[in-house]
Amino acid sequence: MITIKDEEILFDLADLFKVFGDSTRLRIMNVLFSGPTSVGEIAEILDMSQSAISHQLKSLKGNNLVSSKRSGRSMYYELADDHVKTIFMTGLEHIKE
């Protein structure tokens, strides 16, 4: 059994799970599984506006779930690390049981 005694850590964990609680953000992360992708490409794939995608990416980046890098005039986003993939895939496995 895991016992977490620091309340702040539990609040941070709750905030992380809130980010995963939005279907648009999950759809964006799903697109990013294929690798670095621009806002425009994500918007086209998900049939959403670039501003809506940018808004959600800001939240994902603020929670260290995605990272970004510039290439010319475009900004490309990708999943921040393998932890994000693990959380996503563990959730999928859980709902498929």
Image (spheres, rainbow, N blue to C red):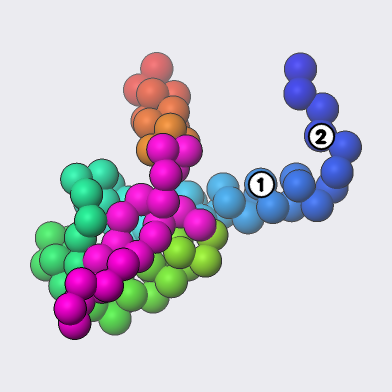
Please report contact status of discs 1 and 2: CB closer than 8 Å, yes or no: yes
Q: Is residue 16 left or right of residue 67?
A: right
Residue 4 percent location from the top left of the image: 81, 34
| Mark carried by residue 13 | 1
| Mark carried by residue 37 | none
Q: Which residue is mark 2?
A: 4
Q: Is residue 88 visible?
A: no
Q: Residues within 10 Å of mark 1 (few under 14, many from 20)?
A: few
Pick the front one: 78 or 72: 72
Residue 57 located within the stretch drawn in magenta:
no
59 vs 18: above or below: below
Q: Is residue 52 left or right of residue 36?
A: right
Residue 61 percent location from the top left of the image: 45, 64
Q: Residue at the location (20% across, 67% down)?
A: 38
In the rendered structure, which amino acid carries the disc numbered 1?
Leu
Q: Read off the magenta span.
A: 64-84
